[in-house]
Image (cartoon, rainbow, N blue to C red):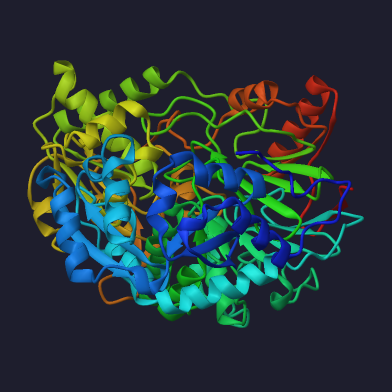
C-alpha cells in the first residue's frame, strides 16, 4: 500500500474530516466502514465486517504508518458475537495449557480481555489464536498475564479499569478532540524546575510552549509529607515536600498532560493531589508503572494515617488518577498534544521505569529526560537505552554524580553481602535489610536465591523472611516479565520464578515468631526507615549486638536510615502505645554499596558518552547540590557542550 505523509511541511495539516476520509479510502470496501474518531492519542475505526482487516496483517500497519498515529480497528456493536457464544469460541480456540483465569468482555471498547498464566499460548504462533478469535467473534482480544504470585493490588486495578470502561470511553473521546485541535506552530519552548533540582525528592519539571503545558513527573518527598500535609502543623520540613506548582503561577486546569517516568513516590506522589483539586487530564506511564503507583500511593495514605499525619489525598483521589491514566509500552510514539510526541525507552531503574523522549513541533526541538536510571549491571533489568532519533537537551539524574561516587564491582558487593550475612547468622544473630519494596527488594531476592541455592559456601541454615509490600511488588514482576532481563523472563515464563524460591518465607501479620526463633535474614519494606515494616523489626532487634542492620540502598539526608549510618546510638520512635520512646542502638550497622538502582559516576559519564546522537545541552537534576554541580562541570568539559545544574524555580528558554 502506498504511504502518504499527511503532515508534510509544504501543505496544511488535514482536518479531522479529511483525515478520516483518507482512512476510509485506504480500507477495503467489504470491511464496512462506519465511522472513525479520535480516542485519546489514537484513531479508532469502526467496521461492520472487521474480519476483512485480519486477512492481511500488513493493512493496519500500513495505514497507521501513513497517518503517523496508532490505529485501532473496532467492530460495531451490532456485529459482535454474544458474550456467552464468544466465550465458548475463545475457550475452544485457546489450548487448555494456557490456564485461563478470567475472560471479561468490555462492550464499550468492543474488547475481550483474556487473563491467563501462559499468555504466549493464548496469542498463538505469530498471533494466530488472537486472529482466529477476532475473525470468529468480532471482539478484539487483549491478553493479560496472571501473576504467578497473587497480587491484590493488580487485581483491584484491573477490575477498576473494567468497572470504569464507560467513563474511560467518554474521557478518551473528549481527550482525542483536545489533542487534535491543531493550535498552529509554537514559536518558543521553555522549562521550569519545580522540584528535584539540586536535591533528591519531589521531582517535577514543567514544559511549556504557547499552546501546551505538561509536567514530567510530579512527586513528593515522602519523609516530611508522611508526617503531615498541613504547613501549619508545626512541621518546618513540610514545605520541602511538594513541587513548587504555586510559585510557577500554574493553574491545574491549564495542564495538558502529566508524563511519569516511574512509580517511586518522589516522582508520582503528588499526582493524586492534582486530581483532588480539579485536574481532569491524562496521566501517561508504562503499564507496570500504573500498577506499582497504585501500590505505593495507597501505602503512603495508610502510613500517613498510622503515624498520625494527614495524607494529602485519599483512595478516591488515587482511583480518579488511575482511570485517567493512559499506558504506553517502550517504543510507542504517542501524540500527547497536537505538537508533542512522547516515546518511552527502558531506564533500567525499577519495573516499567522509562526515559522520556519528547519531540516538539515538526522538528523544532527534542528532549530526553532520564528520570531515575541504571546504566550498569543488575539481575533484573537491561541497562538504560542510549539510542534516540534526536536529542537537543538532556535532563539527567545525578544521585551519584560526584567525582568520588564510584562503586566497586557487583561481584565484590554480592560476596561482601553474603559474607556479612553468614557471619551474623553464625554468631546467632538476625540480619535486618531495609529495602525499597519495588526494585531493590527483588534484586536482593535474586542475589540470595543465587548464592544460597548454587554456592555451597554460602548455604545457611536460616530462613529468609519477606515482609511488607515486597510480596505485592514481586508478584507484579511476574505479571510483566517482558520488562525484565531475558534470562529472568524465561524463568518466570517457564514457571520457575526465583521470587517463589523455597528459601523465602512470607510473613503475613504475625511477627512474634521471628523474634522467638533463631538466626534469620529479614527483608523488610521501608528502605530509608522512615516507616514501613523495617522500623517495626528495628525496634525489637536494635538492642542486641549479635544482630546486624544492613543497608544496601540510598538514604536521604534527613532520613532515619542516614542517622543510623552516621552512628546514632539512640533514636526516638513510637512504642506500642504510640508514645515516643528512646531506642538504644547496639546492633551492628553496615552499609554495602553496589546494589543501587541508580547509576554511579562512572556509569553516568559512560551513558552520556554512548548516547546517540549526542545532546547539545545537558541539565543535571535529582541529586544533592554538589553532586549536580560536579556532574554538570565534568560533562561540559568532557563533551564540550553546555552543561548546567539548574536550581528549583529556574525557568530556561530552550527555543
390 sits to left or right of 118? right
Residue nearest the viewer, comparing 622 with 14 = 14
- Residue at the image point whose x is 72% and y is 69% from the top: 245
318 sits to left or right of 218? left
Give coordinates of residue 8: x percent, y percent: 81, 45
Where is 552 relative to 263, above or below?
Answer: above
Residue 223 visible in the picture = no
Identity of the residue furthest to the right in this view: 187
266 sits to left or right of 618? left
Residue 306 visible in the picture = yes
Give coordinates of residue 538: x percent, y percent: 29, 53
299 sits to left or right of 228? left
Residue nearest the viewer, comparing 507 with 31 = 31
Residue nearest the viewer, comparing 1 with 194 = 1
Where is 108 relative to 381, above or below?
Answer: below
Residue nearest the viewer, comparing 135 with 169 = 135
Give coordinates of residue 623: x percent, y percent: 65, 43
- Residue at the image point whose x is 65% and y is 38% from the top: 2
Q: Quadrant of residue 217?
A: bottom right
Q: Quadrant of the N terminus?
A: top right
- Residue at the image point whose x is 49% and y is 39% from the top: 58
Give coordinates of residue 630: x percent, y percent: 74, 32
Q: Quadrant of residue 523?
A: top left
Where is 220 relative to 609, above or below?
Answer: below
Where is 122 relative to 375, above or below?
Answer: below
User: Exactly how many numbered labels are in the figure?
Assistant: 0
Amino acid at each position: 500500500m502506498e504511504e502518504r505523509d499527511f503532515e508534510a511541511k509544504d501543505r496544511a495539516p488535514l482536518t479531522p474530516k479529511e483525515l478520516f476520509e483518507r482512512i476510509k479510502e485506504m480500507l477495503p470496501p467489504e470491511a464496512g466502514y462506519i465511522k472513525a474518531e479520535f480516542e485519546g492519542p489514537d484513531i479508532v475505526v469502526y467496521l461492520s465486517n472487521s474480519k476483512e482487516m485480519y486477512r492481511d496483517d500488513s493493512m493496519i500497519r500500513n495505514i497507521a504508518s501513513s497517518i503517523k498515529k496508532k490505529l485501532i480497528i473496532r467492530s460495531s456493536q451490532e456485529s459482535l458475537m454474544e458474550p456467552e457464544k464468544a466465550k465458548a469460541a475463545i475457550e475452544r480456540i485457546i489450548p487448555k495449557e494456557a490456564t485461563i483465569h478470567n475472560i471479561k468482555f468490555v462492550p464499550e471498547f468492543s474488547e475481550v480481555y483474556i487473563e491467563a498464566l501462559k499468555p504466549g499460548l493464548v496469542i498463538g504462533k505469530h498471533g494466530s489464536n488472537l486472529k482466529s478469535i477476532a475473525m470468529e467473534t468480532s471482539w478484539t482480544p487483549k491478553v493479560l498475564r496472571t501473576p504467578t504470585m497473587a497480587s491484590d493490588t493488580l487485581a483491584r486495578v484491573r477490575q477498576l479499569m473494567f468497572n470504569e470502561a464507560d467513563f474511560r470511553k467518554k474521557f478518551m473521546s473528549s481527550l482525542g478532540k483536545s489533542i487534535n485541535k491543531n493550535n498552529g506552530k509554537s514559536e518558543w519552548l521553555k522549562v521550569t524546575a519545580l522540584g528535584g533540582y539540586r536535591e533528591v525528592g519531589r521531582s517535577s519539571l514543567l514544559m511549556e510552549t504557547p499552546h501546551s503545558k505538561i509536567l514530567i513527573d510530579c512527586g513528593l518527598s515522602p519523609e516530611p509529607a508522611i508526617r503531615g500535609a498541613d504547613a501549619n502543623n508545626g512541621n518546618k520540613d513540610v514545605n520541602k515536600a511538594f513541587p513548587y506548582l504555586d510559585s510557577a503561577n500554574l493553574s491545574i486546569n491549564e495542564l495538558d498532560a502529566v508524563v511519569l517516568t516511574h512509580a517511586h513516590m518522589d516522582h508520582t506522589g503528588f499526582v493524586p493531589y492534582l486530581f483532588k483539586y480539579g485536574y481532569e487530564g491524562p496521566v501517561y506511564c508504562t503499564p507496570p508503572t500504573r500498577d506499582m503507583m497504585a501500590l505505593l500511593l495507597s501505602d503512603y495514605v495508610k502510613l500517613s494515617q498510622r503515624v498520625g499525619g494527614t495524607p494529602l489525598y485519599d483512595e478516591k483521589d488515587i482511583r480518579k488518577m488511575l482511570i485517567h491514566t493512559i499506558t504506553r509500552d517502550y517504543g510507542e510514539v504517542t501524540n500527547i498534544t497536537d505538537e508533542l510526541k512522547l516515546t518511552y525507552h527502558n531506564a533500567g531503574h525499577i519495573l516499567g521505569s522509562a526515559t522520556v523522549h519528547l519531540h516538539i513541533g515538526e522538528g523544532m526541538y527534542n528532549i530526553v529526560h532520564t528520570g531515575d536510571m541504571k546504566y550498569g549491571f543488575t539481575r533484573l533489568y537491561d541497562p538504560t537505552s542510549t539510542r534516540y532519533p534526536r536529542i537537543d537537551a538532556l535532563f539527567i539524574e545525578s544521585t551519584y554524580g560526584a567525582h568520588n561516587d564510584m562503586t566497586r564491582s557487583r561481584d565484590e558487593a554480592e560476596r561482601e553481602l553474603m559474607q556479612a550475612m553468614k557471619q551474623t547468622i553464625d554468631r546467632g544473630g538476625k540480619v535486618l535489610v531495609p529495602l525499597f519494596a519495588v526494585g531493590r527488594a527483588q534484586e536482593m531476592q535474586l542475589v540470595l536465591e543465587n548464592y544460597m541455592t548454587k554456592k555451597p559456601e554460602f548455604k545457611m541454615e536460616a530462613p529468609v523472611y519477606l515482609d511488607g509490600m515486597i510480596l505485592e511488588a514481586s508478584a507484579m514482576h511476574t505479571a510483566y516479565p517482558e520488562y525484565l532481563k531475558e534470562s529472568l523472563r524465561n524463568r518466570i515464563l517457564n514457571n520457575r520464578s526465583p521470587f517463589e524460591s523455597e528459601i523465602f518465607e512470607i510473613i503475613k501479620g504475625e511477627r512474634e515468631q521471628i523474634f522467638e526463633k533463631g538466626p534469620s535474614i529479614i527483608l523488610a519494606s521501608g528502605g530509608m526507615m522512615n516507616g514501613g515494616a523495617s522500623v517495626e523489626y528495628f525496634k525489637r532487634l536494635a538492642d542486641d549486638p549479635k544482630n546486624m542492620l544492613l543497608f544496601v540502598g540510598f538514604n536521604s539526608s534527613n532520613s532515619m536510615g542516614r542517622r543510623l549510618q552516621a552512628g546514632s546510638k539512640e533514636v526516638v520512635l513510637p512504642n506500642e502505645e504510640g508514645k515516643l520512646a528512646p531506642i538504644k542502638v547496639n546492633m551492628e550497622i553496615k552499609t554495602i554499596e553496589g546494589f543501587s538502582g541508580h547509576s554511579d559516576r562512572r556509569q553516568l559519564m559512560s551513558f552520556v558518552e554512548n548516547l546517540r546522537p549526542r545532546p547539545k545541552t545537558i541539565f543535571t537534576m535529582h541529586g544533592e547540590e554538589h553532586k549536580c554541580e560536579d556532574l554538570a562541570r565534568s560533562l561540559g568539559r568532557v563533551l564540550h557542550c553546555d552543561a548546567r545544574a539548574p536550581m528549583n524555580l529556574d525557568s530556561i528558554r530552550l527555543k
